[in-house]
Image (spheres, coloured by chain):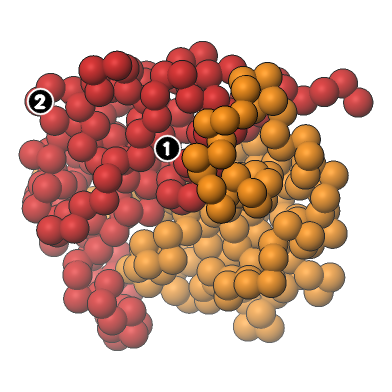
Chain colours: A red, B orange
């Protein structure tokens, strides 16, 4: 099996989309992460779901988790409203890792090793020109691995 | 909202369970990770899904991803059979991080900060005695955050 055999189509976002939109796309699609593409459909970033969540947590709390315990429950419910209208690009900061990307010919072993090493439950699959051709989720990997199970 | 308001019950595994069983529990439950408990129902580990996948990838490939490209497709399909009968405990190695755990009274902000920092789409919720009381998945967090959305 190759990446092209198990890739699926997933909704994507752009750097100019709002955090609120990005969260909505993830939640509605029950996606384990988000692919951020540029205007040419090239993957710019592959964000695991936890890192999409990170975009919504104001930086002060990320730097000092003890602060979070000082916030009362009513305010702790609405922390993310502070950032919801900001864009994905605004919240990323200067350090953006290389996107988690595989070729259409990547094998299950290559995909599994990539997901495990990059701690990313989502991989963007690109064609020969580097354009987004599909995505592989961790759920999709489990299904593919189950199909390779020998009769026992 | 507190952790106890949004926690759900999820299937758990033990260190003595096989890798094949752990993968099956994740895949069937469509879980984003696994909670490994001890005999007293204390969370010993909270493994993100990508790290459950890592258990199934032989160490040689993890250490040298270039090796994965040298494996032909037929063998790359069945890489995980080599380890499937080994136990979760066997494959963990000596370094096991502290489990990603929250109290039942943790707020949404505390939970979000914890998930983002630990890069864990799953949090084990424990009672006063440290025993597993439930779990919070990233999907569950999105739902909780959506409920706190102001009318706009």
- Locate residue A138 relative to residue B144 in the image: left or right: right
Name of the residue lying farthest toward the right = A152
Q: Is residue A124 visible?
A: yes
- On residue B43, the disc is none
Given residues B59 and A34, the one toward you in this image is B59
Label 2 SS: loop
* On screen, residue B42 above or below B35: below
Return the x and y of residue B135 as percentages of the image width and height: 58, 59
Looking at the image, is mark 2 or mark 1 earlier in the sequence? 2
* Local crowd size for mark 2, using a 10 Å CA cut-off: few (<14), some (14–19), many (≥20): few
- Locate residue A56 relative to residue B152 in the image: left or right: right
Chain letter, disc 1 residue: A
- Locate residue A102 relative to residue B68 in the image: left or right: left
Given residues A21 and A99, the one toward you in this image is A99
* Local crowd size for mark 1, using a 10 Å CA cut-off: few (<14), some (14–19), many (≥20): many
Label 1 SS: strand
Q: Which residue is mark 2?
A: A39
Q: Which residue is mark 1?
A: A122
User: Do the dots labelled 2 and 1 sit on one chain?
Assistant: yes
Label pair 2/1, CB-CB below 8 angstroms: no
Chain letter, disc 2 residue: A
Name of the residue lying farthest toward the top = A5
- Locate residue B20 relative to residue B1 in the image: left or right: right
Q: CA distance from mark 2 to mark 1?
A: 21 Å
Return the x and y of residue A65 as percentages of the image width and height: 33, 79
Q: In what quadrant of the picture does the N terminus of chain A appear?
A: top right
Residue pictured at 54% horizontal, 25% vertical: A107
Residue pictured at 36% horizontal, 62% vertical: B116
């Amino acid at each position: 099996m190759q990446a092209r055999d198990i890739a699926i189509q997933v909704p994507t976002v752009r750097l100019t989309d709002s955090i609120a939109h990005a969260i909505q796309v993830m939640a509605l699609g029950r996606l384990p992460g988000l692919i951020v593409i540029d205007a040419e459909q090239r993957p710019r970033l592959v964000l695991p779901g936890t890192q999409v969540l990170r975009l919504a947590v104001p930086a002060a709390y990320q730097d000092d988790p003890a602060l979070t315990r000082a916030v009362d429950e009513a305010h702790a419910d609405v922390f993310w409203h502070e950032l919801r209208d900001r864009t994905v690009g605004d919240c990323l900061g200067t350090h953006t890792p290389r996107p988690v990307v595989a070729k259409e010919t990547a094998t299950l072993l290559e995909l599994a090793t990539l997901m495990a090493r990059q701690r990313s439950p989502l991989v963007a699959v690109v064609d020969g020109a580097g354009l987004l051709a599909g995505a592989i989720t961790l759920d999709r990997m489990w299904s593919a691995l189950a199909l390779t199970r020998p009769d026992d």
